Image: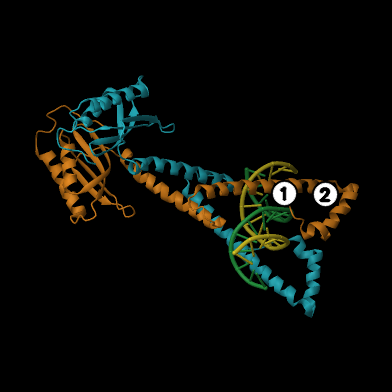
Chain colours: A cyan, B orange, C green, D yellow
DNA sequence: ATCAACACGTGACTC
DNA sequence: TGAGTCACGTGTTGA
């Protein structure tokens, strides 16, 4: 709102020189410099204003909003951006690369943060594979939080997000074994695709 | 790296006073003040350093990386946080409220940004509902990008993320009609759940 | 020579 | 009082 006059503005030697300059007709250049000074001052004010405005909105956005200094706030911001970027990437993973691989494949991994388990399996397609998978998951005490499936050219790829029952002792191994059986049953039986291709997601 | 000595540090009147103070035994207070001054100076340096470090990492994180000034960068940061927060919320929508409603229900909506269509339907459960749905979606020329399903107490709720074929003229209406038929078939036929409950995702 | 962006040191304020 | 944070005006540098 107001600017507090600083020491050298009030009584410093350089300021004294300025005063002398003001009384001197030769002062044109210095007067210009002073004028430029005030525009400079205001420009810097605008700059700070913009930055602080963004920081303020950041503070309002982040759920962390309560009592933090500016630096820590920015730290929170980078944390959020990283975290959200990562989860977004995970969520999109299904959409961007949802095609069955040629070789049979089974990957099971667990998210350290959420505890959620993600399973991805590619194998030959067959009509009953969904039911088999549901049975296998039930046997493994795995609750399906989310599922995606894609079949193309007689091959199918399934993505499963799963949560295991708390008292489950077989753990990831049990889940992996159950799914492996479903896969193997699919590839070993030459009777794949006797019926029409039902699933084309 | 290094601080350029400013005018008043080198030759200002106040600095002269400081020198006098140094030679004077009565200068204790001023010496303390000077000492405090340097810690203050350094403290402020650290503060700036932290802030700028966070800003730098932000710059490296954001895909926007291309030469932007500090304020605009922060603006981009808030944009990203808002955007990612919104998409994250949309993605989690399925997980948080994935329970069938008591009354039959069909909602179809289209995301303005991605063009993706989200359909949510609740109805009585029956074993063949998945196949019926797949047929209906095929007829509506809808490509399923993602699907979630939950059944509890003989009721089932399905969430579908779908993309229509470009040349599709029936549009949202056609998709809605197709899904409605699946729902109605499920509720009208009293033969729901004659077989064991297969799907419990 | 103008402009915009930056880092710096300093006064004020708070806990 | 002292350690920490903030806004300010300024000097400096690259387009």
Chain of residue at mark 2: B
Residue C6 as seen in the image, left or right of residue B88: right
Q: CA distance from mark 1 to mark 2?
A: 16 Å
Q: Residue at x 52, y 53 (%)?
A: B74
Q: Nearer the viewer, residue A192 or A50?
A: A192
Chain of residue at mark 1: B
From the top left corner, tell me how far across and down residue D9 is, in percent: 69, 63
User: Quick check: A94 above or below A43?
Assistant: above
**Can you tell which mark lies on residue A82?**
none
Q: Judge whether residue A192 can be spotted in this image.
A: yes
From the top left corner, tell me how far across and down residue B48 is, in percent: 64, 49
Q: Residues within 10 Å of mark 1 (few under 14, many from 20)?
A: few
Q: Earlier in the sequence, mark 1 or mark 2?
A: 2
Which quadrant would residue B96 be assigned to in this image? top left
Outermost top residue: A169
Looking at the image, how many numbered discs can be counted on the residues? 2
Kindly check if marks 1 and 2 are in contact, taking CB atoms under 8 A apart as contact: no
Q: Residues within 10 Å of mark 2 (few under 14, many from 20)?
A: some
Q: Nearer the viewer, residue A36 or B63?
A: B63
Q: Residue at x 85, y 57 (%)?
A: B16
Question: Which quadrant holds the N terminus of chain A?
Answer: bottom right
Q: Residue at x 52, y 44 (%)?
A: A76
Q: Judge whether residue A69 can be spotted in this image.
A: no
* Disc 2 target residue: B30
User: Quick check: A39 above or below A105?
Assistant: below
* Disc 1 target residue: B41
Disc 2, SS: helix
Q: Nearer the viewer, residue C6 or B17?
A: C6
From the top left corner, tell me how far across and down residue B71 is, in percent: 55, 57
User: Quick check: B72 above or below A126?
Assistant: below
From the top left corner, tell me how far across and down residue C4 is, in percent: 58, 64
Which quadrant would residue B69 be assigned to in this image? bottom right
């Amino acid at each position: 709102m107001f600017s507090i006059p600083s020491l050298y503005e009030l009584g410093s030697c350089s300021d004294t020189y300025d005063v002398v300059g003001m009384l001197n007709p030769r002062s044109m250049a210095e007067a210009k410099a002073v004028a430029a000074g005030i525009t400079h001052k205001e420009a810097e004010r605008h700059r700070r204003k913009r930055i602080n405005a963004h920081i303020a909105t950041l503070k309002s956005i982040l759920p962390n909003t309560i009592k933090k200094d500016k630096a820590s706030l920015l730290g929170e911001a980078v944390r959020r951006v990283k975290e959200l970027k990562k989860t977004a990437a995970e969520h999109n993973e299904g959409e961007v690369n949802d095609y069955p691989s040629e070789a049979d494949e089974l990957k099971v991994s667990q998210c350290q943060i959420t505890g959620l388990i993600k399973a991805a399996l590619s194998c030959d397609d067959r009509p009953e594979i969904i039911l088999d998978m549901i049975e296998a998951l039930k046997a493994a005490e795995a609750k399906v939080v989310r599922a995606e499936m894609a079949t193309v050219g007689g091959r199918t790829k399934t993505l499963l997000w799963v949560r295991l029952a708390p008292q489950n002792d077989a753990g990831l191994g049990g889940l992996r074994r159950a799914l492996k059986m479903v896969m193997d049953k699919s590839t070993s039986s030459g009777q794949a695709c006797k019926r029409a291709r039902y699933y084309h997601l």
